Image (cartoon, rainbow, N blue to C red):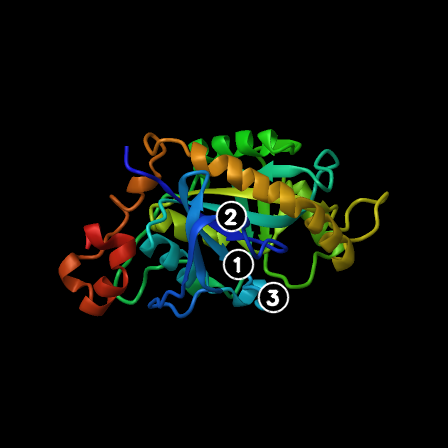
Amino acid sequence: MAERTLGVIGGSGLYELAGLDDVRRERVATPFGDPSDEIVIGRLGGARLLFLPRHGRGHRLLPSELPFRANLWALKSLGADCVLAVSAVGSLREEIVPGHVVVPDQFIDRTRGRQAESTFFGRGVVAHVQFADPFCRPLSGALRDAAASAGATVHMGGTYVCMEGPAFSTRAESELYRSWGGDVIGMTNLQEAKLAREAELCFATLALATDYDCWHAAHDDVHIDDILRVIAANVDLARRTVAALAPSLPARNGCGCGDALAHAIITDRAAIPAAVKRDLAPIAGRYL
């Protein structure tokens, strides 16, 4: 079996990944602009790993400013075949206590104004990927086991509501999302999951609950200082989880992620501009 390469997108508080061997950094030029930061390339527990801080080192980028396409294009071009997104989220459920971990299996999209950053396609090529189950089940299962082995209280499954931000929810919005069946709320993962599917990458999310948003009468409304305190406590947990996951990635068969584009591109290949074929070569080259 060919060696797998895990791409890790670090969320708030996770800007470096300790314990890597054979480390080098690479700044990748992409057709979609610059990624959030340099890609750190190394090995962890014998496994090949790529690390990218989502908001850049120093947390410079708003959720709506993130170069999602450049980030996923860069990871794929460097050999990633699976991606773990680490994200701080608010809890919409009593039982998901701040400090707990959720491995979600569904999304509700409440973003707006990110259409250009939600697909690699357009500019003369049309593709429609299946997205009914947006997360890779085998990778999510391995992530659950890795987080549990790292000492986390893990909730397997749940719906991630992806909002625009950067402001947190109103109380009415928080209650609305709960009535819809939302379990956690964040600002970043939806576009990453869509692009990972288009790039035929297995994708899973390690959602670190930091607060109860603003719906819980017995808890204060969400404040950034409180979030940062919980994040600081969870950074080591996230690092331990990545260290446990990297050498135990599941075999890539049966999930369908690696063939997501097989029947998705409907444009006549002869009508696709040469420049677009060139730009999409790492993503969809074998179909163009």
Report helix, strand or loop for mark 1. Answer: loop
* Label 2 with label 1: CB-CB less than 8 Å: yes
Residue carrying label 3: 58
All told, the count of numbered labels is: 3
* Cα separation between marks 2 and 1: 9 Å
Q: Amino acid at mark 3?
A: Gly
- Residue at horizontal 80 percent and vertical 53 percent from the top: 221
Q: Nearer the viewer, residue 84 or 95?
A: 84
* Cα separation between marks 1 and 3: 11 Å
Q: Is residue 165 visible?
A: yes
Going by the picture, which residue comes out furthest to the left? 270
Quick check: 102 above or below 59? above
Query: In the rendered image, which quarter is residue 274 located in?
Result: bottom left
Query: In the rendered image, which quarter is residue 147 located in?
Result: top right
Q: Amino acid at mark 2?
A: Ala
Side of 175 where 195 appears, left or right: left
- Residue at horizontal 35 percent and vertical 45 percent from the top: 81
Q: Nearer the viewer, residue 287 or 178?
A: 287
Report helix, strand or loop for mark 2. Answer: strand
- Residue at horizontal 59 percent and vertical 29 percent from the top: 149
Report helix, strand or loop for mark 3. Answer: loop
Going from N to C along the chain, the mark reached first, 3 or 2, is 3
Residue carrying label 1: 54
Q: Residue 8: horizontal and vertical position, in percent?
A: 48, 49
Residue carrying label 2: 85
- Residue at horizontal 58 percent and vertical 44 percent from the top: 239
